[in-house]
Image: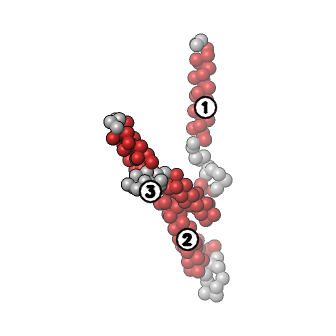
Amino acid sequence: MAWEEWEQLKSEAAQRRSTQMELNQFPAEGGAGVPGGDLVAYQDDLGAVGHDAFVLYDDLRKGTDIAGAGMNKDGAGPTMQAAASLTSRGFAMGSALQLTVEVWTGQAKTVLQACAHISNHLAFSKKSHTRDDAEIAATLRSRDGTAVSVSQISKYFE
């Protein structure tokens, strides 16, 4: 590789890093057209993410052998059956396969638990925010039932 080619590759890599760093930073002026950069979460978005987490949970639960899908009369899934068969015939691979199944099962259960937690938390958050919004709307009413003026609300923040 010629020196000039090496310098060109270094320059291109530096340019890519610079572009990536710009994309990974939050713009100083607030970003995304939101004044002040406040976090905004819409209930539809929360519901969609929660639903996706539930679908992932369900697909993973069905696609893994955690519950022993395809179990034989001894209660072992097909992979554990293969591990037992290999071990009984003196193959060291049998114990390695059994360990692999145990590690896989532990990791799959962790991912399942995380998906369930995300789904449940977002469903709870959606309901909680709806309830909070209704309570705030009911609280911030004048005696005659009309909405409280902005100047009246501003007094709470002084």
Residue 68 in the image: state x and y as whole percent: 44, 54
User: In terms of depth relative to the viewer, which is nearer, 8 or 119?
Assistant: 119
Q: Is residue 88 above or below residue 109?
A: above
Which residue is identified by label 3?
67
Q: Is residue 30 above or below residue 123?
A: above
- Identity of the residue drawn at 37% across and 36% down: 93
Q: Residue furthest bottom?
A: 144
Residue 53 in the image: state x and y as whole percent: 55, 57
Residue 81 in the image: state x and y as whole percent: 40, 47
User: In terms of depth relative to the viewer, which is nearer, 59 or 43?
Assistant: 59
User: In terms of depth relative to the viewer, which is nearer, 95 or 9?
Assistant: 95
Please name the amino acid that badge 3 sits on. Answer: Ala
Which residue is identified by label 1?
16
Which residue is identified by label 2?
127
If you read the primary sequence from the N terminus, does the residue marked by circle 3 or circle 2 appear first? 3
Residue 51 appears left or right of 86: right
If you read the primary sequence from the N terminus, does the residue marked by circle 2 or circle 1 appear first? 1
Q: How is the image coloured?
A: secondary structure
**Which quadrant holds residue 154?**
bottom right
User: Badge 1: how crowded within 10 Å, few (<14), some, or many (20+)?
Assistant: few
- Identity of the residue drawn at 52% across and 55% down: 62
| Marking on residue 139 | none
User: Badge 3: how crowded within 10 Å, few (<14), some, or many (20+)?
Assistant: few
In the image, which is nearer the foreground, mark 2 or mark 1?
2
Please name the amino acid that badge 1 sits on. Answer: Arg
Q: Is residue 74 above or below residue 133?
A: above
- Identity of the residue drawn at 62% across and 74% down: 151
**Which quadrant holds residue 75?**
bottom left
**Which quadrant holds residue 9?**
top right
User: Badge 2: how crowded within 10 Å, few (<14), some, or many (20+)?
Assistant: some
